Image: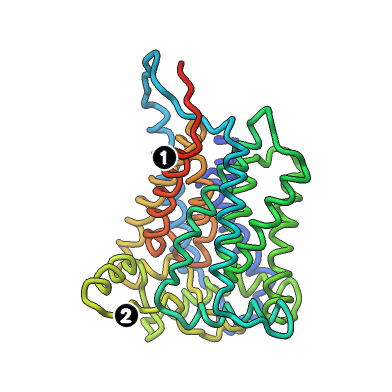
């Protein structure tokens, strides 16, 4: 009900308060459908804690969004503004260049196996084992930023590229992103795309659902070679993190309870001390099926319950402010389109504090690209 209320108030499914509540409802509904799979039941005190956390996040997002709305920004005449409306050809060129460069660097050093699937799995295995960051990964923020800026430019520009050219650009970029071999970045691109083009029409909701379903098919069936029912996969990626959080973090302080909330600062310390940063991949546990994700709440709660609610306020406030500004600022709109992932997948894993470095890199990439392709407009 709270999700419907926020949707009625904000009229945007991508508002932080709307997404967080709808995802919470989806998790609860998913548990009802798949409760027979788990060896642990979902308890009332866990649901109350999660509901309180989501409510704290939602109220913070709505409040700071409303507060930002009250602030009036006065614009003087003859001030230089920057627009990307006429930069779609420049951005298309940048997307292609970065995608091809990423493909070349990403494929370097790997021998092609018996199939493209075996090739991708070989790359993924190397990524999981490597606790350091591959230098080629620093291209990703620029790739993501340029693509979102291109989609935005092409959606508002009068002189759009042809459909064939657009399909070709998206196909090359998609293949480059697929070589990342991780689901996170692909989900980020899907949400970014639909936030920028809008999902007001019913058919766009269908496209969004088909995109998510297609992603699951690619990763679960083709790349991983796994088989199972739809309920099984929904359980694994939608509900099992909450069950794991309850048993290994919330109700029991087990050896699996590890926090990566300060991983960004731990990585900086490792750079200066010469140490090796701990891998972000947590141990697998059995909750009726295997999982190694424990929701974003686990990284906060294992430190302190108070830290959990404090971070819900901080995360919600930043999300609400970004959503409000993104409605009239293209630079912020591009950044927010990817930042949506941090609260859309809050029931899967922590990606707000853990990926702090990535968000900083994204901001830098957006400003650099905006400077390179900007069109000066005087009002």
Q: Residues within 10 Å of mark 2 (few under 14, many from 20)?
A: few
Give the secondary structure at mark 1: helix
Residue at 62% x, 62% y is 176
x, y percent for residue 9:
55, 35
Q: Is 208 positioned to the left or the right of 44 in the image?
A: right
Q: Is 173 positioned to the left or the right of 342 in the image?
A: right
Residue at 36% x, 50% y is 313
> Is residue 107 among the parts visible in the rendering?
yes
Label 1: which residue? 321
Residue at 31% x, 62% y is 307
Name the one closer to the observer, 68 or 341. 341
Q: Residues within 10 Å of mark 1 (few under 14, many from 20)?
A: many
Name the one closer to the observer, 218 or 299. 218
x, y percent for residue 233:
68, 73
Judging from the image, the colouring scheme is rainbow
Name the one closer to the observer, 277 or 55. 277
Q: Is residue 106 above or below residue 196?
A: below
Cβ atoms under marks 1 and 2 closer than 8 Å: no
Label 2: which residue? 276
x, y percent for residue 339:
48, 51
Give the secondary structure at mark 2: loop
Q: Is 36 positioned to the left or the right of 363 in the image?
A: right
Q: How many numbered marks, from 0 up?
A: 2
């Amino acid at each position: 009900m709270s999700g419907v209320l926020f949707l009625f108030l904000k009229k945007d499914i991508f508002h932080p308060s709307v997404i967080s509540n709808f995802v919470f409802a989806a998790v609860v509904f998913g548990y009802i459908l798949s409760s027979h799979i788990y060896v642990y039941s979902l308890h009332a005190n866990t649901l109350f804690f999660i509901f309180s956390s989501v409510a704290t996040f939602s109220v913070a997002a709505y409040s700071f969004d409303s507060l930002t709305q009250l602030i009036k920004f006065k614009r003087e005449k003859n001030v230089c503004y920057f627009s990307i409306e006429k930069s779609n050809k420049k951005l298309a060129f940048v997307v292609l260049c970065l995608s091809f460069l990423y493909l070349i660097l990403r494929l370097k050093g790997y021998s092609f196996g018996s199939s493209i699937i075996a090739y991708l799995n070989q790359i993924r295995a190397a990524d999981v084992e490597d606790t350091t960051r591959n230098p080629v990964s620093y291209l990703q923020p620029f790739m993501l930023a340029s693509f979102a800026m291109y989609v935005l430019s092409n959606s508002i520009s009068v002189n759009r590229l042809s459909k064939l050219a657009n399909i070709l650009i998206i196909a090359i970029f998609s293949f480059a992103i697929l070589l990342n071999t991780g689901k996170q970045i692909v989900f980020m691109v899907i949400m970014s795309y639909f936030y920028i083009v809008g999902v007001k029409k019913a058919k766009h909701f269908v496209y969004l659902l088909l995109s998510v379903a297609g992603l699951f098919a690619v990763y679960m069936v083709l790349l991983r070679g796994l088989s199972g029912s739809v309920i099984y996969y929904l359980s694994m990626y939608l509900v099992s993190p909450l069950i794991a959080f309850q048993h290994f973090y919330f109700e029991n302080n087990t050896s699996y309870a590890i926090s990566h909330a300060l991983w960004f600062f731990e990585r900086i310390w490792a750079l200066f001390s010469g140490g090796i940063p701990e891998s972000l991949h947590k141990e697998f546990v059995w909750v009726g099926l295997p999982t190694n994700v424990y929701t974003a709440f686990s990284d906060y709660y294992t430190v302190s319950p108070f830290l959990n609610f404090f971070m819900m306020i901080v995360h919600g406030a930043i999300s609400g402010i970004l959503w409000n500004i993104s409605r009239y600022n293209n630079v912020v709109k591009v950044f927010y389109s990817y930042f949506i992932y941090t609260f859309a997948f809050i029931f899967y894993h922590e990606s707000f504090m853990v990926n702090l470095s990535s968000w900083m890199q994204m901001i830098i990439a957006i400003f650099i690209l905006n400077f390179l392709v900007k069109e000066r407009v005087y009002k």
